[in-house]
Amino acid sequence: MPPKPTRRDALHNRERILTVAREALAASDTVSLTAIAKEAGVGIGTLYRHFPTREALIIELYRHDIQHLIDLAPALLRSHAPSEALRLWFDEVARYGRLKYGVAEVIHAATNQGVDDEYYAPFLGAIGALLDAGAADGSLKSGLDPEDVLLQLSVLWRIDPARDGAARAARILALVIDGLRAVPARPDRP
């Protein structure tokens, strides 16, 4: 027997829970599921039907956000110069880092420290596409390793958002981008 189709209101509730949870967890890693359900306008039972554990909710957010980043790289390359696409993509990675800050342990445990992460190779592919496009137009160094760049970006999930995290992330990303450029920026020009 085929699976019963999901009702539109159930899909709406699920998306609302994810939206609220993303914002709440980015603000505080100790937010309760009850608070998330209340803010989403659903009962706690509805939240638990969609996400039976806190970890299940966090992993679904991770999957959703990582897939968004993977899909975003080629979209940015279609509409921006490679160096600008890279900068915009890094900005989105920094936003994701604010969520991951408080829940990194759960994600790492669920993905066996990344070894079993189905998104790892596609995420590296997104980085590689951005780097390759920048190397092709001469704005970025050639031969950059996407894993090296990912290691540099991993500092973003260690930045406490409550301690001027957005400004610190912007400064760190500027350093990373400057290091990737074919010709680093001089202080007198951007």
Image (cartoon, rainbow, N blue to C red):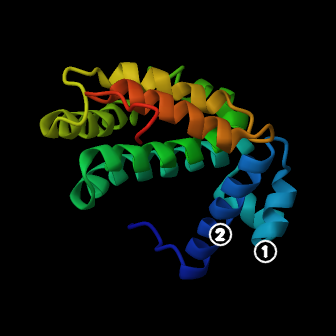
80 displayed left or right of 87: left
* Badge number at residue 16: 2
Percent from the top left, x then y, of residue 157? Answer: 62, 32
Snapshot quadrant of residue 120: top left
Q: Report the residue at 38% width, 32% height from top.
A: 185
Percent from the top left, x then y, of residue 63? Answer: 49, 46
Assign a secondary structure to mark 1: loop
Snapshot quadrant of residue 76: bottom left
- The vertical placement of 152 against 4, above or below, is above
Percent from the top left, x then y, of residue 159? Answer: 68, 31
10 Å neighbourhood of mark 1: few (<14), some, or many (≥20)? some
Query: What's the residue type where badge 2 is placed?
Result: Arg
93 displayed left or right of 130: right
18 displayed left or right of 8: right
Q: Report the residue at 58% width, 35% height from top.
A: 171
10 Å neighbourhood of mark 2: few (<14), some, or many (≥20)? some
Q: Residue furthest left?
A: 136
Q: Nearer the viewer, residue 52 or 143?
A: 143
Query: What's the residue type where badge 1 is placed?
Result: Gly
Q: Report the residue at 50% width, 47% height from top.
A: 91
* Badge number at residue 18: none
Assign a secondary structure to mark 2: helix
Q: Report the residue at 36% width, 53% height from top.
A: 72
Q: Nearer the viewer, residue 187 or 161?
A: 187
- The vertical placement of 71 against 83, above or below, is below
Name the residue carrying label 1.
Answer: 41
Tell me the quarter of the image containing the C terminus.
top left
Which mark sits nearer the N-terminus, 2 or 1? 2
* CA distance separating discs 2 and 1: 8 Å
Q: Are marks 2 and 1 in contact (CB under 8 Å)?
A: yes
